[in-house]
Amino acid sequence: MRSTGFRRTFAAIGVCSLALAVSACGSNDGPASGKTRITVNCEPPKSAKVDRRFFEEDIASFEKQNPDIDVVAHDAFPCEDPKTFDAKLAGGQMEDVFYTYFTDVEHVVDTGQAADLTPYVKELKSYDTLQKQLRDIYTVDGRIYGIPRTGYSMGLIYNKKLFQKAGLDPDKPPTTWEEVRADAKKIAALGNGTVGYADYSAQNQGGWHFTAELYSQGGDVVAADGKKAAVDTPEGRAALQNLHDMRWTDNSMGSKQLLVINDVQQMMGSGKLGMYLSAPDNIPILVKEKGGNYDDLAIAPMPGDKGTLIGGDGYMFNKKDTPAQIRAGLKWLDHMFLTPGKGFLGDYARAKKNNAPVGLPEPRLFTGAADARDQQAKKANANVPVENYQSFLDGNQSLRMKIEPPNAQQIYSVLDGTVSAVLTKKDADIDQLLKDASGKIDTILARS
């Protein structure tokens, strides 16, 4: 899964129809003009007017600086649609430079549709400045097949106003799941439909969040060798028991369940929810689309002080790309996304001028001097209450950062049923649920 927000909210997959010929997406070097032509995707749709304009401005400035390169952008929503991604991949219809989630990498490489960037990556000026753990996601068997664009980590978004009303310190969010439970109970006691803690349990999102909660307990979903499930453990039981007790013993999760992200965001934006798990990029959505207020919304690190789920996205290259197209695509990535303080994601001055949020703690892509430049530019243009995110930044320093499991979507589908059973059946047998889920995950892993 991915967190839903920031500019990724408006990102889009290329719109090459599966009915078109392969040449409509993958392309040769370029037209008769002698330019190198590349198709790229994830252009914001026309409905996201500001982001669309930024994207087009950045492509125009890139082409002006590189008159020998022609960039053709494709848009749609979302950037990657699971319903069409595999079909485009299998049909060889991907753009020359195409968007992927972190969880796609090995699958794309296994299908033989990705270009090997290893001989060319030295030409990507920013490569060594990117976080190694993010770079490594796109490295398979020692070969580099893609470039990270953003990264996120899960934390605990909470409503400072409700904390204060419940007699809690809004500047001291819970750091353990025991504290989350206690605080949720106090917030729910405010009444008038107020919910202390909410969680997803449908559309694979419940499995995604259970994975994050399991990581926070120090557990895992799949064993280190990638061959067996690891959910039927004390950590798995602790995560489910905590949800069960908040739902049925404390009544702090409300009676409506089988929620998805939009439901929970609506609750938080309307001021009726105390806490939920997410990444910082949810905060602008809560304000712009759900009626929330930046001053009321804060984010803390994942409770438990053991681990958090990370995710993100990047770009891979079509196996049919010529060397000239690969070099052009790498230049484009440097210009668009990977130069601190500049480009589509990093031009904070432009974002502030257009009333886009600046100062959120993520994405944080760079290291060393590049990170310092990026953070300095962000701080100089901040227009959101950055103090509300400091505990998240501080707490993340000690957490184990864990990517989503292999075969994530299939596994999340299994775990959806596990979580939904706990939240909808008071007498749910947690031990049996974990045993059943473990067997189903083992089957998924055996087939992969």
Image (cartoon, rainbow, N blue to C red):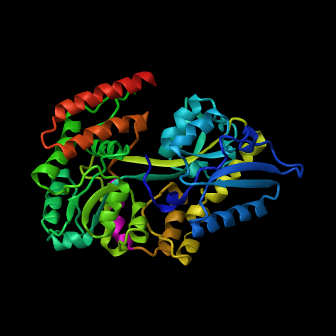
Image quadrant assignment for residue 17: top right
In the image, residue 106 above or below residue 15: above
Q: Residue at x 31, y 65 (%)?
A: 268
Name the residue nearer the viewer: 255 or 209.
Answer: 255
Magenta span has 446? no
Residue interval drawn in magenta: 385-397
Magenta span has 391? yes
Image quadrant assignment for residue 142: top right
In this image, 253 relative to 131: left or right? left
Name the residue nearer the viewer: 399 or 52.
Answer: 52
In the image, residue 405 above or below residue 194: above
Residue 72 in view (yes/no): yes
Image quadrant assignment for residue 370: bottom right
In this image, 93 relative to 230: left or right? right
In this image, 223 relative to 77: left or right? left
Name the residue nearer the viewer: 299 or 25.
Answer: 25
Q: Main secondary structure of the magenta part?
A: helix
* Residue 85 position within the rendered picture, expressed as x and y whole percent measured from the top left: 56, 40
In this image, 406 relative to 119: left or right? left
Residue 321 in view (yes/no): no
Query: Can you name the residue that lies furthest to the left here?
Result: 249
* Residue 281 position within the rendered picture, expressed as x and y whole percent measured from the top left: 43, 60
Q: Residue at x 44, y 22 (%)?
A: 447
